[in-house]
Amino acid sequence: MQVKTTGSKYEFFLEGPISEKTGLYDYVIKNATEVVVDMDKVTFINSIGVKNWISWTMKIPAGCKLQLSRCPFVIINQINMVHGFLPKTATVESFYAPYVCECGTEANLLLQRGKEYEYPHNGEKERLDIPETSPCKKCSKDMEPDFIEKKISGFINPPG
């Protein structure tokens, strides 16, 4: 894990599993106005990792923006299944969605806030424009989403 601080902004670059051994939990965020967690190299999360993640996010100061970027699909599943995994003031800025081709190729397509989706704001509803296909790099045919759209979009407009 790498950490970068610039004034009141903290940036964490996570690698490997999120578990009881994740170094992120050793950081106490004080006087921060923005925390960015880049999850590009996260491989999985276990149940203790989920518990510790929720505990850590609860310690982030009120008024501090928490932004998650390049979240792997395993994190999106946790966000949508585990109440409290994503604090109400946090946003997912980008995440990887799995796509599959009939030739057997699998790929993860990066979906970005402001491009493929947007949270509700200024009286407008949430927006979700997930590509129906993506070109396969192996055979050039169309790859299709390997997920159910309604099951991944819960974080964009959570109930309540």
Image: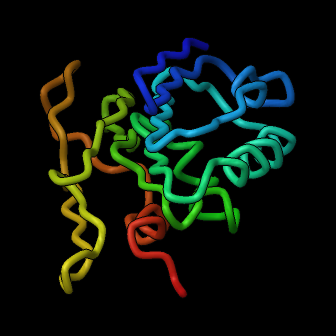
- Find the residue positioned furthest to the top: 2
Position of residue 93 measured from the top left corner of the image (x, y, whole percent): 34, 46
Residue 119 occupies quadrant: bottom left
Quadrant the C terminus occupies:
bottom right
Above or below, comparing residue 95 to residue 65 in the picture: above
**131 left or right of 77?**
left
Above-or-below relation of 119 to 63: below
Viewed as shown, does residue 85 lie left or right of 160? right
Which of 76/99 is in front? 76
Q: Which quadrant is home to the N terminus?
A: top right
Q: Position of residue 114 (x, y in %)?
A: 18, 54
Residue at position x 52%, y 51% in the image = 76
127 vs 73, left or right, is left
The residue depicted at 34 percent of the width and 43 percent of the height is 94
Question: In the image, what residue occupies the spot 47% across and 70% down?
Answer: 154
Residue 18 x %, y %: 71, 30
- On the image, which quarter does residue 152 sit in? bottom left
Q: How is the image coloured?
A: rainbow
Residue at figure coordinates x 71%, y 32% from the top left: 28
Q: How many marks?
A: 0
Q: Is residue 22 above or below residue 117?
A: above
Percent from the top left, x then y, of residue 158? 49, 76
